[in-house]
Image (spheres, grey):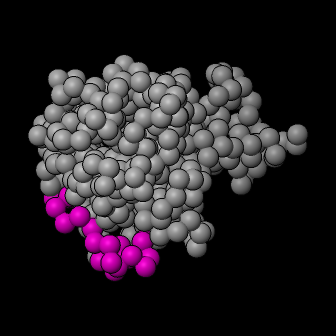
Amino acid sequence: MKRRDFVRTMCYGGIATFGLPVVNFAQVAQSGRLVFILLRGGFDGLAALVPYGDPEYRALRGTFAYNASDLSALDDTFGLAPGLSPLRPLWDAGQLAAVHAMAIPHRTRSHFDGQAVLETGLDRPAGAADGWLNRLLQVMSGTRSGIAIAAGMPLSLTGSYQVESWSPTQLGAVDDAFLERLAVLYRADATLHNRFEAAVQQQELVGEEPMARGNARRGGITPLMQAAAKILRQDQGPNIAAMEFSGWDTHANQGMAGGALDRLLGQLAEGLVMFRNDMGSAWQNTTVVVMTEFGRTARPNGTRGTDHGTAGAGFVLGPRLARSSVIADWPGLSTSALFEGRDLKPTLDTRAVLKAAIGGAFDLTAAQIERVFPNSSAVRGISDLMG
C-alpha cells in the first residue's frame, strides 16, 4: 500500500484507528444538541412500553404478557419493561416522553424500505439522496456541525452538508512510538498533517474504552454512549449526532424479563443514563430521540418471538421537554383495532415527533422545518412535546 493510501485509510476509514478526524466544531448561536438513535431491526414496542392497562392486552400477548408488578408504571395504561426501569428517574425529573402507536408514513415490513423512509424523512423509500439530519444542518442558521458516531455514515446524515464520523478502533492499541513515526510521515504532506494531529487529539479526548461496532447484542451501547458524551459535551462540540445499534430483530426466543430483548433494553437504558450523567452541564441543552423502523406483530409467533409489524414505540429524552408524558392516540388491541388483523395500528407519524423535537431543540421556524421534511405540511409537530 502506498504511504498516502495508508494514511487515508487511517484517517478516513469507517473504523477510524485514532478517532475523530477533527477536534474543533462550531455551534449555532442556540446551544442545543440533538442526538438521533436508530435501533435497527424493528424492536417490539409492546414489550418495551407495555400497555398493561389495555383490556385486551393479556389475551392478545399470551405468554408474552407482563404482570403489572413487573413494570415501572407510567400511568394507568402504560409501563416500562423491566430492562428500561433505569429510565424511571428521568421520568420523575420530567425528562422522558414515551411515544406509542407511532410509525413511518409508508406501510412496509421491509427493513431496507423502513429504514430508508425513517432516515430520509420522506413518505416513501425513494425520492431523496440525502437524510433529514443533513437537511437540518443545511437549514440551520449560523455555524453548525454534525457527526455520525457509527461504523459507517448513516443515511440520515448523508447529504451535501459536510459532516464527520467517528467509531472506535477495532485494531488494538497503538503505542506512542508508532504514532511518532507516523507523525514524521504526515509532516511531509500538508493535506493530511492537520487531520492526523486532530485525530490523535480526539482519541485522547475519547479514551480507549472497549467498544463494539454498534451491535447491541455485543454490549456496545453504554461505552459508545459514553464516548458520544465526551465528544458532544465539548464547548465547541457538534450540534447534531447520529447513532445506531443493531440486534433488535427478535423473530425467535425474544423472552420476557431478563430475556434477550429485555437485556437489550437494559443496555439501551443504561447507555442513555450514562450519556446523561457524562454530558454534565451540557445535558441541559440536549435532546435525544430513539426510534426504530417499525414495530412487531401484536401476537407472538411460533418460535417465541415476534415478526415484522407496523406501529411501535419510541422515546424522547432531555430537559427541553415540556414534561414527562406518554404520547399516544391509543388505538386499542382488540382484533378489530389491529392493523391488517396483526399489528398495532399506527396513529402517529414519526415526522410529527421529529418536527417537534428539532423545533424545540433549535428554535426553528415552520418554514425551516418544512424544508427538513418536504411535502409534509399535513403532518403537524406534537404541540406539547417540547417546552
Q: Which SS does the magenta portion mostly show?
A: loop
Is residue 276 rendered to the left or right of residue 221?
Answer: left
Q: Position of residue 56 (x, y in %)?
A: 24, 41
| Residues shaded magenta | 366-387
| Residue drawn at 52 percent across, 69 percent down | 124
Q: Position of residue 374 (x, y in %)?
A: 44, 76
| Residue drawn at 52 percent across, 28 percent down | 303
Quadrant assignment for the C terminus: bottom left
Can residue 378 be seen? yes
Q: Nearer the viewer, residue 291 or 21?
A: 291
Quadrant assignment for the N terminus: top right
Q: Nearer the viewer, residue 126 or 366?
A: 126
In this rendering, is residue 111 above or below 305?
A: below
**Number of numbered discs overlaid on the protein picture:** 0
| Residue drawn at 56 percent across, 65 percent down | 125
Is residue 165 rendered to the left or right of residue 254?
Answer: right
| Residue drawn at 32 percent across, 73 percent down | 379
Q: Nearer the viewer, residue 208 or 69?
A: 69
Q: Nearer the viewer, residue 172 or 242?
A: 242
- Residue 384: say if magenta: yes
Is residue 178 rendered to the left or right of residue 27?
Answer: right
